Amino acid sequence: MPVPWLLLFFSLVLGSRPWVFSLEKLAGSHDDARCSQGLSCHLWDDVLCLPETIESPKDPVLVPTKLQTEVVLRCTEESNCVPCVRVTLHLTVQEPRKEDPDENGFREDAEPTLRPWPRNESLQAKVILSFQAYLSDRCVLVKVEVPAAMVQPGQNVGSLVFDCFKAPVGGEVRIWSYTQPPYQKELNHTQLLPDCIGPELQDSVRSCWVLPWFNVSAEGDAIQLVLDVSTEQNYILYLYWNQTRNFSTRFREVLTGPQNITLNQTDLVPCLCIQMWPNMHDAIRNSHCPFWEDSRAHKNLWSHSKLKLQFWGTTGLSWRVEAPCHLSAEIVLCWKPMNSEPCQPLPLPLPRQNVTVNKSQDLPLRTLHPNVCVQVWSRETLQIQECPQEDILGPLRDDVLLLETWGPQENRSFCAMETSGCTPLPSIAHTRAALLGKQLLQDLQSGQCVQLWNDTGILWACSLQKYTHERWVLVWLAFLLLAACILLLLLLNRGGMKGWLQFLKEDYRYGGASRPRRALLLYSPDHASFERLVGTLATALRQLHISVSVDLWHRRELSALGPLAWFHAQRRQALQEGGVVILLFSPGAVTLCQEWLQEVGVAQRPAPTADTFAASLSCVLPDFLEGRAAGCYVVACFEELLPPKGIPDLFQAVPVFSLPSQMPAFLKALLGAGKRRQDTLKAHATRVGQYLQPALEECLQLGSSSSL
């Protein structure tokens, strides 16, 4: 016989939820907002639920610091009630934060100048309460005023109580709270509503009197839904995954009479909910989510969950956890050594981030590294781990991770992250990093290490490869001697020498024998997605042994010199070394060129700008107008963003390439003169096109959404 699983479930759960048996009843049907003693509150009408950008306050502001909810009953009569969610907010006066580091990683040392709060001036705030239930949402605004005498930065000044949000029987609702404008990350809380099984709702909520009933039984791995209704009654059964702001339908049928339905094990997750109602218009629905504490459901949840990484350029990394239900988990960055040891979590102060499912979030790394992986932890257990693919950042490197910190007297200290812990440098310990401590610190001082993180501490990745191979010096010397002998033989055989030289000419990939050709990439920053596309293109060209200069990678130098001076220096260096200037056209670049061309012959030219492309036009256009562009410039555009015929005729005097269809010819023009195998060029062009595709699709999606 099947075990009455649901009865056992309720015997364990209802005892820990006193609101099922004793719910406060509120008279009337109107919403109400009230504040604790000393504060004043005013409830406004409903407002639109619109997201806003977090702002940094310059004066003390009032913010919510704690969100609590409870279930009450709103009644028009003693036996005519509906469930309702009461929200309680605790409010605190927040001081202005210290200035955050800018995009170059600098932090102001001095405390910001704060305006003292006038003793006769009250503090006001607009508090938003956002309510989300199945197929419905609502936002209300409450204006709160704090008297001047109570304004004490960093102190709790009181609380706000809102009565109340009407909620469905047996459902799950989500409450958010933030200010308008927001000064910090929003607070949120999930509230489960009691269902009609509880005696309090059976006696007070009329919709519970006529609902069909169901039960869940389990025997072994089989889970059955037992529907106890009369043979004459028609009803609708609905199974769904109750996700945050997203509801995935698993089963929906119109049934008659009692039924036994076996649940699919793959659908059994904590947020699997059951809903039943009579097959009639506007019928009240009976909802229940009985699997929140089921161990099999939680095990299935992680088997359904996936972690996806997205990269752009050398500094951009975002992660996205895809799961059918909300996860209580954290994202952790870890360091995976080359020798296949377990991935070690990166040391503090690198922050951990809470997981918000089905939403992309950025990781604040200054530089990406193939040894840095992403993990998802839940309840002190590693659930998912994902590392960069080799075709994106390359294979794992034989690097060591150094942590730089500052003492109370601004003295710096370093330690190397190893399996045994963080080894101080220099050190007399007998670990690999300790033995190479002096050399690693010298590499750090000479700029040979890569900075991954910069905040209250700095993380550096330093290469160990050259020290690993020192013991093979004799072997390398023997190899070099053998190679010299082979070259001597090839010199005696011209045919063999010719083939060797042909091989060297074709080896233009990163790390090849030839000297990299320099290229200056100019573009118009139409929007952030296009800048990421440009960064991805520059990264791909660097992997093909082309030394690319682009303003995205020289923000500090650009800020110090100004865009025009920086352009002159980069252009002069590129042309003196036989390089080339790439003009990457977009709709914004075409507009800027047309504005400049219209100003030819006019005394008043366009005003200087912080845009490198716009600033460079004062030199680029004269080169084309006076016929000096040939051999120094190439023109390119992404054909899906701008057709080649959209480029002004003036720039047709140099080669024009449409990407990615003409990628082989574009690469051949950048790599300079010399015969190269056509199939090798095509292979590299195909690889570059695949590397560009995600960033290009992001730009196309932005363009299509803008047109709508």
Image (cartoon, rainbow, N blue to C red):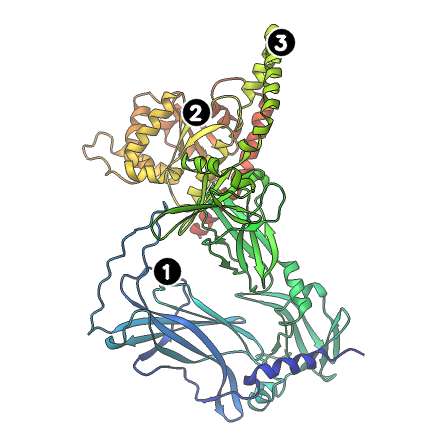
Residue 604, disc: none
**SS for dot 2:** loop
Q: Nearer the viewer, mark 2 or mark 1?
A: 1
Q: Is residue 537 visible?
A: no
- Reply above or below: 699 against 17: above
Mark 3: give few (<14), some (14-19) or many (20+) Cα within 10 Å.
Answer: few
Q: Residue at x 41, y 37 (%)?
A: 445
From the image, tell me which residue sits under label 2: 655
* Residue ranking furthest to the top: 492
Q: Nearer the viewer, mark 1 or mark 3?
A: 3
From the image, tell me which residue sits under label 3: 489
Q: Quadrant of the N terminus?
A: bottom right
Q: Residue 76: where, in percent of width, then height?
A: 47, 90
Residues 594 and 132: in front is 132
From the image, tell me which residue sits under label 1: 54
- Between discs 2 and 1, the one toward the N terminus: 1
Task: Give the amino acid type for the residue marked by disc 3 in the picture.
Answer: Leu
Q: Nearer the viewer, mark 3 or mark 2?
A: 3
Q: Residue 409: where, in percent of width, then height?
A: 33, 51
Q: Are marks 1 and 3 in contact (CB under 8 Å)?
A: no
